[in-house]
């Protein structure tokens, strides 16, 4: 049998095991439709494209999702990558399937002004679809999981880009949905490409100790199993070593060795009912010494993602601490597969209390809080909301509220309702009055005091609130209630920032320029722009930076039009390969560059790749700016990317001795984030006696730090020496030169 057909048959058998009433003909029709639509398309590994949707459908079936979800998984790339349409899929397989496929499909055919905007629209569309049908994100996570499993066939830059996106967006979503099994695999696969050295170090160390780990796990497992047998408790016990990314975070974020990790081992005890969970807890604490402050009861207080379990950390006779999780079989299913385990479409397990819209209230809250944000803000706040550590507090009625760590009474008030936050005049925590900036702790009982005649929130609350939901609701209040004040405030802040940037308001409000400016900042009128700055929807500095970019773009367009109309002598007479003067040595500028065919022309070095003597280079004749010199390996100089009709504008250039004493270039250093990394870089550069014109570092959310360096060097040889010295700094895993994008 054909291998692909064999995989399809195995998929069908898998679904029939949990959905005996499966319409096999409809499923096979979806498979053949996808196979035909993707006919001729190949994956990066050379396999037929149908292997990808088939693999995604297999992962969806592993979650025991309904047949419509599996069919949607088979068809999920059809609208995006083939001639198939929403209408065609709806006609063949029904509107619910078409809606699921549409929800998963990216907006790849729409023009966007920036990558951030594209990402925003893709994510926003996905979340809106989630709010209607959570199966959209379940399929999307399965899609991303298979892409990560086959990421070795992608380029290094694509591997890092997709891995970072997975770590920042998809793994946290899987966590919020309670899908721990998929979350762990997504994190481990992402880490493999984000820090291959760190990943390999942990894997090798775990492999070297595997025999000792297995002995310890087996010994503890047997002791717990014997005790359960003695107590006549029916249950299953198994242990494991924590997954790689979990270990990585503890080792590198907390600067610990593998021996210093407190809870390297985890054991699970799965029993039949809740009373037995607590009986087992008593047995565990009787057998081993419990660690104070390390017990959590998620059965009595479940997490918002439906997770339930008892967690305790104990120390055995060996002196090794380990975690024990105790749960029922139903809780275990939920812990592994989260929402998918109890989704209302699952065959034979409909439960009115599970998989309802209430379970996904956080999706709708997230959408509501991001309605008026721009692309950059949306993506940033999404990451914050997804990654935030949680604190669980209670209302006076005993309802549980999940808030980000460090949350204040302001965050609590707005989590209840916008009106409660807007009318808040005070707050009590555990019966005592507290200030607005009081940090809430797990188990706090919070009461909000309100008044009908309250003046509304203060702008200072924006600095106190920790949740994006609260901050956005405060901004919306100011936007709605204080429009005239916002316009006046915003105009003043905008004009101040313009003066700081050396610009006049007249240059922005000019009739020929203003429409372009408003389009750039995504506002309809000047008053709307002022109001957005006034209520905090955007900042004056960011807006002025956008204005500067747009003015520069308009200036370049005007210069190009003038240059084109003038048809300058230099451009019209340039013949590639012509040296002029009967084959004499061509002249060169003070830059140290010989331009073949041109003499005494303006030469500039491209900022995208910053070439230095010793680099193979090529020149491009610009309109009005002379010859731009690129490294030959710069993507912007790639022959495949050159525009038709511009071949004659690419000319040969070469280095000549006796040019400039130093040349500016740029480096990007990636390292594990730690205190003093920027200082170490600066000391190495100082010792090398190299002139540094700019150096700045930023911490990434994944535990890395990126250091940007602008420096001056004599040639490529000196630059290579500096790169080697930087690579020897502790924690540095990569130093690369700037390349065009």
Image: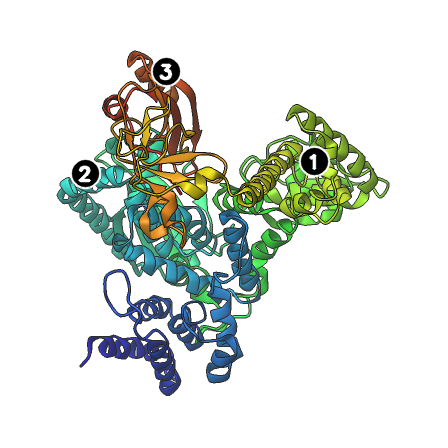
Residue toward you, 116 or 32: 116
Q: Tell me residue 36's x, y (percent).
A: 34, 79
- Look at mark 1 in the image and give the residue it sits on: 428
**N-term-proximal mark, 3 vs 2:** 2
Check disc 3 and report its element: helix, strand or loop: strand
Q: Name the residue under label 3.
A: 691
Quarter of the image where the C terminus is located: top left
Q: Distance between the residues labelled 3 and 1?
A: 58 Å
The earlier-in-sequence mark between 2 and 1 is 2
Q: Nearer the viewer, mark 3 or mark 2?
A: 3
Rendering quarter of residue 276 = bottom left
The residue at the point 49 percent across, 63 percent down is 109
Colour scheme = rainbow
Position of 502 with respect to 209 (left or right) is: right
Judging by the rendered image, the residue that carries numbered circle 2 is 205
Residue 514, above or below 363: above
């Amino acid at each position: 049998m054909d291998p692909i057909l064999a995989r399809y048959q195995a998929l069908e058998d898998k679904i029939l095991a949990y959905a005996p009433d499966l319409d096999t003909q409809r499923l096979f029709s979806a498979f053949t439709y996808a196979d035909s639509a993707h006919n001729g398309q190949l994956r990066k590994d050379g396999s037929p494209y149908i292997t990808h949707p088939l693999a995604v459908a297999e992962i969806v079936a592993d979650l025991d999702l309904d047949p419509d979800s599996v069919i949607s998984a088979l068809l999920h790339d059809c609208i995006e990558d083939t001639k198939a349409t929403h209408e065609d899929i709806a006609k063949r397989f029904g509107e619910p399937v078409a809606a699921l496929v549409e929800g998963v499909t990216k907006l790849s055919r729409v023009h966007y002004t920036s990558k951030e905007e594209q990402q925003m629209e893709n994510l926003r569309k996905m979340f809106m679809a989630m709010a209607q049908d959570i199966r959209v994100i379940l399929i999307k996570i399965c899609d991303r999981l298979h892409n990560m499993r086959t990421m070795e066939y992608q380029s290094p830059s694509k591997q890092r880009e997709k891995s970072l996106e997975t770590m920042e967006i998809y793994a946290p979503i899987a966590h919020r949905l309670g899908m721990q099994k998929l979350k762990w695999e997504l994190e481990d696969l992402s880490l493999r490409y984000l820090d291959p050295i760190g990943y390999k170090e942990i894997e090798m160390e775990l492999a070297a100790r595997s025999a000792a780990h297995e002995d310890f796990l087996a010994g503890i497992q047997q002791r717990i199993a014997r005790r359960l047998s003695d107590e006549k408790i029916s249950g299953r016990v198994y242990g494991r070593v924590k997954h790689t990314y979990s270990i990585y975070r503890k080792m590198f974020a907390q600067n610990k060795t593998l021996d210093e990790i407190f809870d390297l081992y985890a054991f699970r005890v799965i029993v039949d009912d809740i009373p037995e969970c607590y009986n087992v807890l008593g047995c565990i604490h009787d057998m081993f010494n419990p660690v104070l402050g390390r017990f959590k009861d998620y059965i009595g207080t479940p997490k918002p993602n439906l997770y339930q379990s008892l967690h305790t950390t104990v120390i055995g006779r060996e002196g090794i601490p380990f975690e024990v999780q105790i749960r029922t079989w139903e809780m275990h299913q939920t812990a592994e597969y989260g929402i998918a385990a109890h989704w209302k479409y699952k065959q034979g397990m409909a439960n009115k209390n599970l998989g309802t819209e209430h379970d996904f209230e956080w999706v709708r809250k997230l959408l509501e809080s991001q309605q008026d944000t721009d692309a950059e803000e949306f993506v940033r706040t999404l990451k914050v909301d997804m990654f935030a550590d949680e604190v669980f507090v209670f209302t006076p009625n005993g309802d549980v509220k999940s808030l980000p760590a460090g949350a204040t009474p302001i965050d609590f008030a707005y989590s209840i309702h916008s009106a409660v936050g807007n009318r808040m005049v005070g707050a009590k925590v555990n019966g005592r009055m507290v200030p607005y900036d009081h940090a809430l702790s797990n188990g706090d009982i919070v009461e909000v005091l309100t008044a009908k005649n309250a003046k509304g929130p203060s702008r200072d609350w924006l600095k106190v609130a920790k949740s994006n939901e609260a901050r956005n609701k405060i901004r919306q209040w100011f936007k709605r209630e204080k429009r005239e004040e916002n316009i006046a405030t915003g105009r003043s802040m905008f004009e101040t920032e313009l003066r700081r940037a050396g610009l006049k308001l007249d240059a922005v409000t000019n009739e020929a320029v203003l429409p372009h400016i408003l389009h750039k900042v995504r506002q309809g009128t000047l008053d709307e722009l002022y109001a957005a700055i006034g209520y905090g929807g955007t900042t004056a500095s960011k807006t002025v930076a956008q204005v500067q970019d747009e003015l520069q773009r308009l200036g370049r367009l005007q210069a190009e039009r003038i240059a084109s109309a003038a048809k300058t002598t230099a451009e019209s007479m340039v013949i590639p390969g012509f040296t002029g003067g009967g084959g004499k040595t061509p002249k060169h500028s003070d830059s140290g560059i010989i331009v073949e065919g041109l003499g005494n022309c303006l030469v500039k070095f491209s900022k995208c790749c910053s070439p230095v003597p010793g680099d193979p280079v090529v020149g491009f004749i610009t309109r009005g700016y002379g010859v731009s010199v690129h490294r030959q390996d710069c993507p912007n100089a790639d022959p495949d990317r050159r525009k038709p009709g511009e071949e004659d504008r690419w000319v040969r250039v070469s280095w000549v001795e006796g040019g400039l004493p130093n040349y500016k270039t740029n480096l990007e250093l990636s390292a594990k984030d730690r205190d003093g990394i920027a200082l170490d870089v600066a000391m190495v550069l100082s010792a090398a006696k190299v002139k540094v014109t700019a150096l700045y570092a930023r911490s990434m959310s994944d535990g890395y730090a990126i250091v940007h360096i602008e420096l001056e060097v004599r040639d490529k040889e000196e630059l290579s020496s500096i790169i080697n010295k930087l690579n020897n700094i502790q924690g540095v895993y990569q130093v690369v030169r700037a390349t065009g994008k």
